[in-house]
Image: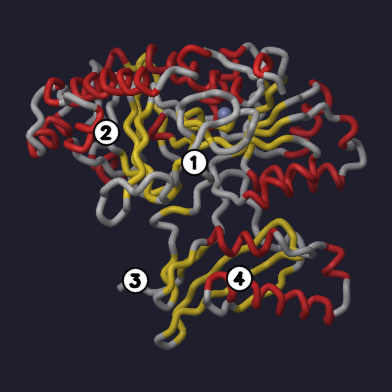
C-alpha cells in the first residue's frame, strides 16, 4: 500500500504532532473538569484532591492530581448522579452489558452522539471501510453500545448498514449472500460459529459471499485466534476496543496495518498504570488502562479504571497516525485467577488450545477447591474428525494439552475432552470461566 492509499477520515487530526495532541488533551481535560464540577459526585471528589476549578489543571501531567473513577462509582451514581447537563439535553442512554446488579449507564447529548458517531466512522475508515461497503452488524442492538453506536458510525461513513443484530445464523448468512455484505461486526466466538454454519450449509458456500473484513471486539482473544478466523473465512480481521462507559466500540481501532489499536487521543486520554501502585509503568510496560473521555458533555468520566491490562506499542505505525497504539489485551485485573498462589490468565489457556490441532472452537475453565488446594479443570471441545478417531489419539491429545499448559502456567490442569458442540456458544460475550471456590 502506498502512502497515498492509506485511508483517513481526518488526516490533520489523525497525524497531528504530539504537541498538538497534548494541547487538545489539556483543553479537553479542563472542559471535563468544568463538566465534572456540575455533578455532586465529582465536585466532592475534586474537593478531596484540592481541585475547585478547571484552572487548577495547568499541564497534561496534572491529570495525576485528579481522582480515579471505578465501575462501583458508576453503580453508586445510578441513575443520574453523573449527569452534567439538564436532563432535557439528553437524547439517548446506553448501559453496560452486565447481567447482574445495578447497571452502569451513560447519557449523551445530540452533540455527544455526533462525536461518538464521528469517532466510530473514523475507526471504520482507518480499517479500510468505505461508503461502498455493505456492513452487517451482528452485535446485539439495545442498551449495548456495540449495536447502535457502531451502527450510527457506519451510517455516517456512508456504508449500507444491515442491522441484523446478534443470533439467527441462517438469516445472517442469507442476508450476507443476498445483499453482498463486505464487512461484519461480531465477537470472535460468533465468527467461528458463522464459519461452522457456512461449512454445514447446503445453500450457501464461501464463494457466494463478498465478505472481506470483520471487525471484532467485546471479548478478549489471542493473535492465534485471529489468524485462525482469518484462515478459515479468508478475510481480514480487525481488532477494536471499546466499552459502554466510553461510548462503545470506536475508542481504539486497528488501521490497515493491523499492528495494535490506535487510541484516539484527541477524544480520550489513555494512561497505563501499575494496578497496585497506580503510578505510570515504564514506557512500553504492561499495566491497567485508565481512560478519561474528552468528547462527552453529558457525562464526564475521569481516570476511569478499566481493569483491562495492556501496554502501549513503542514506535511509529506505518500508517503515519500519531495516536498511540494499544497492544492486544492480556487480560483483566479481575479476570486473573489466583490458583494455588499462581497468577493465571484465561488467555494463556486459550493460547495453548488454539495452537493445538484437533481442538474445536469452545472451551470452559472451572476452578474448584479440593481440600486445601485449588483445582483447575479445562473442558475442551475437540473437532468432529478427532472425536471420530480412536481413544489412543484422544488420550494423546489430552496428555499434550496437559503438558503444554502446565509448562506455560506452571499449574497442572485436569483436561476434560468434550464432544463437538457440547459446550455452550454465546452470541454476546462468551463466559468461559467459572470460579466455584467458596468466597472467604
Ligand atoms: Zn496505523
Mark 2–mark 3 distance (CA, rounded to whole Å):
31 Å
Residue at the front extreme?
A: 315
Q: Position of residue 394 (x, y in %)?
A: 79, 76
Report if the beta carbon of the residue with label 4 is closer than 8 angstroms to ligand 1.
Answer: no
Q: How many marks?
A: 4
Q: Position of residue 64 (x, y in %)?
A: 21, 38
| Label 4: how many Cα within 10 Å (few below 14, some 14–19, many 20+) | many
| Label 1: how many Cα within 10 Å (few below 14, some 14–19, many 20+) | many
Q: Position of residue 293 (x, y in %)?
A: 34, 28
Mark 4–mark 1 distance (CA, rounded to whole Å):
32 Å
Camera-side mark, 2 or 1: 1
Mark 2–mark 1 distance (CA, rounded to whole Å):
23 Å
In the figure, is residue 352 to the left or right of 385?
Answer: left
Report if the beta carbon of the residue with label 3 is closer than 8 angstroms to ligand 1.
Answer: no
Residue visible at 35% across and 16% down in the picture: 109
In the rendered view of the protein, which quadrant contains the N terminus? Answer: top right
Q: Position of residue 246 (x, y in %)?
A: 40, 31
Mark 1–mark 3 distance (CA, rounded to whole Å):
37 Å
Camera-side mark, 2 or 3: 2
* In the image, residue 234 above or below residue 108: below
In terms of depth relative to the viewer, which is nearer, 38 or 327?
327
- Check disc 4 and report the residue beneath it: 378
In the rendered view of the protein, which quadrant contains the C terminus? Answer: bottom left
- Check disc 1 and report the residue beneath it: 313
Q: Earlier in the sequence, mark 2 or mark 4?
A: 2
- Check disc 3 and report the residue beneath it: 439
Amino acid at each position: 500500500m502506498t502512502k497515498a492509499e492509506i485511508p483517513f477520515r481526518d488526516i490533520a487530526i489523525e497525524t497531528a504532532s504530539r504537541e498538538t495532541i497534548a494541547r487538545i488533551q489539556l483543553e479537553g481535560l479542563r472542559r471535563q473538569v468544568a463538566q465534572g464540577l456540575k455533578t455532586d459526585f465529582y465536585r466532592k471528589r475534586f474537593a478531596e484532591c484540592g481541585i475547585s476549578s478547571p484552572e487548577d489543571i495547568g499541564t497534561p501531567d496534572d491529570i495525576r492530581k485528579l481522582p480515579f473513577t471505578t465501575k462501583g462509582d458508576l453503580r453508586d451514581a445510578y441513575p443520574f448522579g453523573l449527569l452534567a447537563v439538564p436532563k432535557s439535553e439528553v437524547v439517548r442512554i446506553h448501559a453496560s452489558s452486565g447481567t447482574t446488579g445495578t447497571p452502569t449507564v451513560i447519557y449523551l447529548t445530540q452533540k455527544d452522539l455526533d462525536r461518538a458517531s464521528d469517532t466510530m466512522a473514523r475507526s471504520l475508515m482507518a480499517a479500510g471501510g468505505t461508503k461502498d461497503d455493505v456492513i452487517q452488524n451482528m452485535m446485539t442492538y439495545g442498551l449495548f453500545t456495540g449495536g447502535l453506536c457502531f451502527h450510527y458510525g457506519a451510517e455516517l461513513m456512508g456504508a449500507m448498514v444491515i442491522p441484523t443484530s446478534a443470533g439467527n445464523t441462517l438469516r445472517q448468512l442469507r442476508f450476507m449472500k443476498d445483499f453482498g455484505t463486505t464487512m461484519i461486526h461480531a465477537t470472535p466466538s460468533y465468527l467461528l460459529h458463522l464459519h461452522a454454519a457456512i461449512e454445514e450449509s447446503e445453500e450457501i458456500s464461501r464463494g457466494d459471499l463478498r465478505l472481506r473484513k470483520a471487525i471484532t471486539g467485546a471479548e478478549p482473544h489471542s493473535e492465534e485466534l485471529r489468524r485462525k478466523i482469518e484462515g478459515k473465512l479468508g478475510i481480514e480481521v480487525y481488532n477494536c476496543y471499546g466499552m459502554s462507559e466510553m461510548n462503545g466500540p470506536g475508542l481504539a481501532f486497528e488501521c490497515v496495518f493491523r499492528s495494535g489499536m490506535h487510541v484516539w487521543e484527541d477524544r480520550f486520554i489513555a494512561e497505563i498504570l501499575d494496578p497496585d501502585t497506580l503510578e505510570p509503568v515504564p514506557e512500553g510496560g504492561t499495566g491497567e488502562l485508565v481512560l478519561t473521555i474528552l468528547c462527552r458533555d453529558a457525562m464526564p468520566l475521569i481516570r476511569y479504571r478499566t481493569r483491562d491490562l495492556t501496554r502501549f506499542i513503542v514506535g511509529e505505525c506505518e500508517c503515519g497516525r500519531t495516536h498511540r497504539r494499544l497492544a492486544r489485551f492480556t487480560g483483566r485485573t479481575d479476570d486473573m485467577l489466583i490458583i494455588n498462589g499462581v497468577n493465571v490468565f484465561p488467555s494463556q489457556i486459550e493460547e495453548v488450545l488454539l495452537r493445538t490441532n484437533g481442538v474445536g472452537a469452545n472451551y470452559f475453565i472451572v476452578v474448584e477447591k479440593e481440600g486445601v488446594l485449588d483445582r483447575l479443570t479445562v473442558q475442551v471441545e475437540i473437532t468432529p474428525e478427532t472425536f471420530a478417531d480412536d481413544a489412543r489419539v484422544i488420550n494423546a491429545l489430552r496428555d499434550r494439552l496437559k503438558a503444554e499448559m502446565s509448562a506455560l502456567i506452571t499449574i497442572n490442569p485436569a483436561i476434560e475432552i468434550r464432544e463437538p458442540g457440547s459446550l455452550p456458544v454465546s452470541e454476546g460475550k462468551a463466559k468461559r470461566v467459572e470460579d466455584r471456590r467458596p468466597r472467604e
